[in-house]
Image: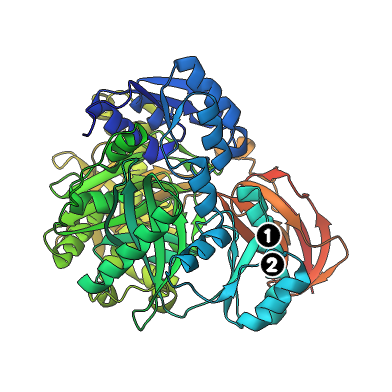
Amino acid sequence: MALAKPFESVLIANRGEIAVRVARTCRAMGIRSIAVYSDADVGALHVRACDEAVPIGGVSARDSYLRSDRIIAAARQTRAQAIHPGYGFLAENADFAQACADGGVTFIGPSPQAMRAVGDKIAAKKTAIAAGVPVLPGYLAASQSHDALEAAARDVGVPLLIKAAAGGGGRGMRLVTDLRELGPALEGAQREAQAAFGDPTVFLERFVENPRHIEIQIIADTHGTCLALGERECSIQRRYQKIVEESPSPAVSADLRAQLEDGAVKIARAVGYVNAGTVEFMLDEARRFYFLEMNARLQVEHPVTEMVTGLDLVREQFIAASGGALKVEKPPPSGHAIEARIYAEDPIHDFLPSTGRITTFEAPNFPGVRNDVAVEAGSDVSPAYDPMLAKLIVHDATRTGAIAKLATALDNYFVGGVVTNIGLLRWLAEQPAFASGDTTTSFLPQHFRAEMLERLIDRDLAELAAAGALQSLPVLRRNTADPWRTLGPWRHLVDTRRVSLNGSLVEAAWQYAAGGWQCRREDRSALVSPKASGTFELATSSRTAKFAAWLTADGVAVTQGGLVMQFAVPRRPTDAADATNRHGGEVIKGSVEAPMSGTIVKVNVKPGEIVSAFQVLLVMEAMKMEHAIVAPYPGTITAVKTEAARSVMAGDVLAEISEA
């Protein structure tokens, strides 16, 4: 029988939206929730979402959320009965699960033995083979010598994937389409696997063109019950990271669903798995399925399963971990759910992570919409952690209705201070291929180009929005308590202003009756009215739209349909004395700069070396991913300004190059 309150207290060994989400179930069940936080997360939302909070120091994950000793100490300090690891960090660390058991604290997840059995991707594939579940051809042997891997690659053939044996989420993964690329790809995959999981072991797997990524949610207890709760379609990805998930999959029939669920349960039972887990499969164009891996934790995308089953999977995790019995009956699915991940990244500029302080955060709120959020206005987006800010989940009776609801929800999602992928998600919701269910892992490469988003921006209208916002933002920023008490005397100082934005001149005149700025440029005009929390309303003769705006280092930025436009404003002469920029007052010609804050992991060049255009000069790690820094043109390296293991800030000069 399910227990009403399986634990008195639970420590949540994570941060962000998953920590907030676990705390929500704790509160609903009357369980005392305990947060841990790094030095970078002192004021984070998850800290306030819990009943108690314990500092664990550090800024980077390796100095905080990956410190199992500090997590266990925090549990002892607060007398927590159990630890929920969330996902990522220590969630699939068998040694941490064992340390919890040794310390007398219940780990809310599978046993260390089961975790090891499925956590090693090579061992998990062998388990699947023994259970009669199909797997892709590849190399699963123990030898990690270059010769053995190279020989295996020739046998497997290209294209092939190199994958980390100890992890997932796209880390330690490389696609090889030419065997001449194998050496650097192996080196990069092994280095990333070591950094992410502490284990450089990799395996090889035949790459399937245009597959679907299908996963089965399971939940099991200690009484012999193992339930498969239907599938999730997780095919739309960028850099092997999922961005949209849905349940049920438009490609899975009732018969195929039964086969997938049967395979998932067989693998879980084979390793004695208890608690929530996800068994991932690949579906090829002929609808043949192959086992990929099992994630021994709660998945990021678990809310879509919750929306169609009505279950609270965290509650079920608590029950299973405490030794209670799960419901024997599998809930029948109801309707269709879609999840979209909101990332702080720029899809127009190769999905570069965006960091900074969030000035506006307004999530949509209407029936059939769920928001699992990690941030709020005033939160800092740090390069030390994953760039996901929130998850938007919608539910409707039909898939068509869910897509329409997703589009409406994204239209009402406003984030300021950082660039997000909201515009990309809004574009995706209107794509015919998405509507028809043609969602393979090749969706973005086949359908998306950055210029598609750029064409959606009405630059003239964005200029008018920026000009109007620029008049109010300095005052709104200075008066944080109640800006409307101070706008009265401020706005009487001047009725008309001229603003130069990226070289264009816009005239802004305050309209007393309308309570906004009438902005004009040539033959276009719009009324821009300040609203709340850094949002504004723009009204023309034919449309009204809401947008977010914020001040930047050199001007102002505005959102338009989730996309961001930035405008430079000339500095006043009086500002010149203290307007030193990040290079100390001068721009270094031929400099190669860090596109974001992060850590240098490899330097490939030295002074005097001749390089070709787009040659990889350095490799940096930021927000859990590696990024190649390339030469902008052919030339000679005149200076290298950094070294491996050094932390750098966005805009720091990494190297100097003279053009050939």
Across and down, in percent, residue 528 comes to 24, 48
- Residue 190: give its label: 1
How many residues crowd mark 1 within 10 Å: few (<14), some (14–19), many (20+)?
many
Q: How is the image coloured?
A: rainbow
How many residues crowd mark 2 within 10 Å: few (<14), some (14–19), many (20+)?
many
Q: Nearer the viewer, residue 282 or 3?
A: 3
Across and down, in percent, residue 536 comes to 26, 45
Q: Disc 1 residue type?
A: Gln
Residue at (48% x, 47% y) in the render: 114
Q: What SS does tag 2 mark?
A: helix
Across and down, in percent, residue 374 comes to 38, 39
Q: Nearer the viewer, residue 122 or 348?
A: 122
Residue at (25% x, 77% y) in the render: 432
Q: Where does label 2 land, which residue?
A: 186
Left or right, 226 with reference to 191: left
Up-down relation of residue 504 to residue 390 (above or below): below
Left or right, 291 with reference to 176: left
Across and down, in percent, residue 602 comes to 74, 56
Q: Nearer the viewer, residue 165 or 50?
A: 165
Decide if residue 126 is in sight here.
yes
- Are discs 2 and 1 less than 8 Å apart at CB? yes
